[in-house]
Image: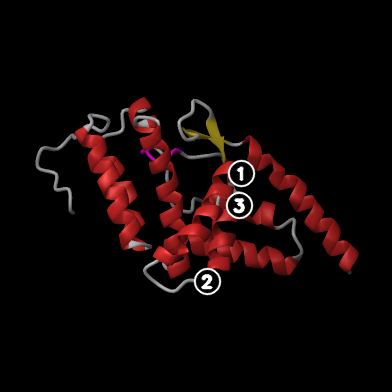
Amino acid sequence: MHTDNLLKQIDFIKEIDKLKYIQRKTKLFNSDRHENDAEHSWHLAMMAIILAEHSDKQIDILKVLKMVLIHDIVEIDAGDIFIYDTSKNHVNTEEELIAAKRIFGLLPVEQAKEFIAIWEEFEEGSTDEAKFAKTMDRFEPLLQNVSNNGGTWTEFDVPYEKVYDKKKAIKEGSELIWNYAENLINESVDKGVLKKELTNYKRNE
């Protein structure tokens, strides 16, 4: 029984090594090298530990860590979807669910159920833990882009309005972190890194 579980867990451990090969659009801080999904997940886990005190709600930090460490594992099958790509669905696609069931299904049944449930909770984004995990997920690439003089915003000509719309989810987990992030976004406009499309767009919406 225990040997069988161990073999399944090792198969899973081998499978998730593939996460290191999934390249993201964002680049490392002050760098030209693209970040991979494994690096992203590790960085979010460290950020969650360090910034947990700034969560607006009391959170189970272990659950948050599980969320940020497994949330992108489905991209082994489904691939990375650029957050500003308007041609693709970013919300719990059928392709990602199939990937979650296959990859987490390599684990013993109870662990597989737990991981799928945690992944679904993150995707739904309604619990306090999921909100804070998503705060981390949206905050890290913002910091990267600012460090790289616009990064993907400049490379893909992403306007202020789209950046603001995607990043305002940070506020759901932490008002303080959002205030900091919003200032960075607005400073990027002042520096000419982000361009506004709509003259009547309100910053504080």
Alpha carbon separation for disc pair 3 and 2: 27 Å
Alpha carbon separation for disc pair 1 and 3: 20 Å
Q: Residue at x 50, y 58 (%)?
A: 50
* Among the two numbered marks 3 and 2 on one chain, the one whose residue lies closer to the N terminus: 2
Question: Do the residues under discs 3 and 2 have CB atoms within 8 angstroms?
Answer: no
Q: Residue at x 39, y 64 (%)?
A: 54
Q: For residue 198, what is the image quadrant?
A: top left
Q: Amino acid at mark 3?
A: Ile
Q: Give the side of residue 35 with respect to residue 84, left or right.
A: right
| Disc number for residue 98 | 3
Other residues around mark 1 within 10 Å, as few (<14) / some (14–19) / many (≥20): many
Q: Amino acid at mark 2?
A: Asp
* Among the two numbered marks 1 and 2 on one chain, the one whose residue lies closer to the N terminus: 1
Other residues around mark 3 within 10 Å, as few (<14) / some (14–19) / many (≥20): few
Q: Amino acid at mark 1?
A: Ala
The verdict on residue 159 being magenta is no
Q: Nearer the viewer, mark 1 or mark 3?
A: 1
Q: In this figure, which residue is indicated by the disc labeled 1? A: 38
* SS of the residue under disc 2: loop
Residue range (magenta): 82-86
Q: Residue at x 81, y 57 (%)?
A: 8
Q: How far from the left and from the top, in percent, is residue 164?
A: 27, 45
Q: Is residue 188 above or below residue 11?
A: above
| Disc number for residue 118 | none
* Among the two numbered marks 1 and 3 on one chain, the one whose residue lies closer to the N terminus: 1
| Dominant SS type (magenta) | loop
